[in-house]
């Protein structure tokens, strides 16, 4: 079995962090392939067990990197475990593919370069050239059945896990926190509008909005702090000290940040779109992401009602414990063992 972990770049997005977890777990059992830019995430002992290929196929190189990585994937032979839907073989039936989301199909105006891949190529491969498909939520599984007519028996749902450790001695501060890339589907525009509207109420004069991991976003608005890139320690710090984690995304295939914020014992507000209602259950406030008033009212509700906020912190933390990497990795081991067939 070859594990294609070439999606891991220098800077980790959600899929990159997922891929890193899988790569580290299986590197002594299977051949794991990474690109040169991913070396920084492995220690010297781990690197001895990895096959390292050109950095030019890294996601750090944008669309060109994605295209070259797709070509590279189609040169691989034998049993392949592709860790995202962007690395697929057009011809190899002995492959397992993890589908995290189908965002370009759902939001074509934001993903013109990827739309046709998700509209025509991906469904063909999923239906005809896969041994098994793994999704990270039931919501994504349902979309594959609805839009691609994939046989439900080919799909297995395995939730992602969370293994971040937090310093719970850190006290909460008057901070509203968001983390995510600067993409239209992350709904940053409405997050900012909601915060500006909230600040019109003098009771929230002392509050600040921290936007983390947003890349090249540049703003000059009072009390909004931009953190273009967050180190792991900075990310853990802001997750913990925030009174609210605000995540009104237009779509998520899973939603890593929500579970991480809950593990930090931070009250969360999420949208009613995508997988988020499935992932949070009743442990967060759910809003209409297109309705700024809905977001503002949820913020006020949490920030003014300490009993509610504390209750959401507790419920959220308990909910986050359901997402356990040890349990998930056992499921991946089973799937790989069951599908390691001769090529």
Image (cartoon, grey):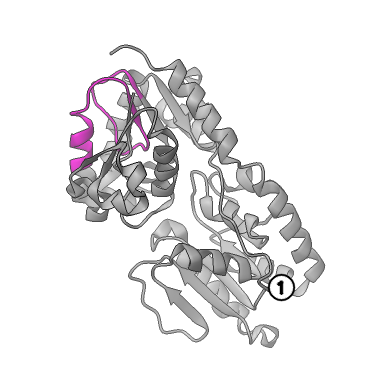
Q: Give the quadrant of residue 31.
A: top left
Label 1 SS: helix
Q: Is residue 275 visible?
A: yes
Main secondary structure along the magenta-highlighted residues: loop
Residue drawn at (51%, 22%), measured in percent from left and top? 334
Looking at the image, which residue sits at the far right?
307
Front residue of 75/189: it is: 75
Where is residue 96 drawn, in percent x and y? 38, 25
Give the residues drawn in magenta, as a range: 68-95
Q: Residues within 10 Å of mark 1 (few under 14, many from 20)?
A: many
Q: Is residue 84 magenta?
A: yes
Residue drawn at (48%, 22%), measured in percent from left and top? 335
Residue drawn at (33%, 52%), measured in percent from left and top? 109
Where is residue 230 drawn, in percent x and y? 43, 67
Residue drawn at (62%, 85%), measured in percent from left and top? 200
- Relative side of 113 to 156, left or right: left
Residue under label 1, please give it: 303
Looking at the image, which residue sits at the far front?
45
- Relative side of 121 to 23, left or right: left
Q: Is residue 287 visible?
A: no
- Quadrant where the C terminus lies? top left
Front residue of 153/78: it is: 78
């Amino acid at each position: 079995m070859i594990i294609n972990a070439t999606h891991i770049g220098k800077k980790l997005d959600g899929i990159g962090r997922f891929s890193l977890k899988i790569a580290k777990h299986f590197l002594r059992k299977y051949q794991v392939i990474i690109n040169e830019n991913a070396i920084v995430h492995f220690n010297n002992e781990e690197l001895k067990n990895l096959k390292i290929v050109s950095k030019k196929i890294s996601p750090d190189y944008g669309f060109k990197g994605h295209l070259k990585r797709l070509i590279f994937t189609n040169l691989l032979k034998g049993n392949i475990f592709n860790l995202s839907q962007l690395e697929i073989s057009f011809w190899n039936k002995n492959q397992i593919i993890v589908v995290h989301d189908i965002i370009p199909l759902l939001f074509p105006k934001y993903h013109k370069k990827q739309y046709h891949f998700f509209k025509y190529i991906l469904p063909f491969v999923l239906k005809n050239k896969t041994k098994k498909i793994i999704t990270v939520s039931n919501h994504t599984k349902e979309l594959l059945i609805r839009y691609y007519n994939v046989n439900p028996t080919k799909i297995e749902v395995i939730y992602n896990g969370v293994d971040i450790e937090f310093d719970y001695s850190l006290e909460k501060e008057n901070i509203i926190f968001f983390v995510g890339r600067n993409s239209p589907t992350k709904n940053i525009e409405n997050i900012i509008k909601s915060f500006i509207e909230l600040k019109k109420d003098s009771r929230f004069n002392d509050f600040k909005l921290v936007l983390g991991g947003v890349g090249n976003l540049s703003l000059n608005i009072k009390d909004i702090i931009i953190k273009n890139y967050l180190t792991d320690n900075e990310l853990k710090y802001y997750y913990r000290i925030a009174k609210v984690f605000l995540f009104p995304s237009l779509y998520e295939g899973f939603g890593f940040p929500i579970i991480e914020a809950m593990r930090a014992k931070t009250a969360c507000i999420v949208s009613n779109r995508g997988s988020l209602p499935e992932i949070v259950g009743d442990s967060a406030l759910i809003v209409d992401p297109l309705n700024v008033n809905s977001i503002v009212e949820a913020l006020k509700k949490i920030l003014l009602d300490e009993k509610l906020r504390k209750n959401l912190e507790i419920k959220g933390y308990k909910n986050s414990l359901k997402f356990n990497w040890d349990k998930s990795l056992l499921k991946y081991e089973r799937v790989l063992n069951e599908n390691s067939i001769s090529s």
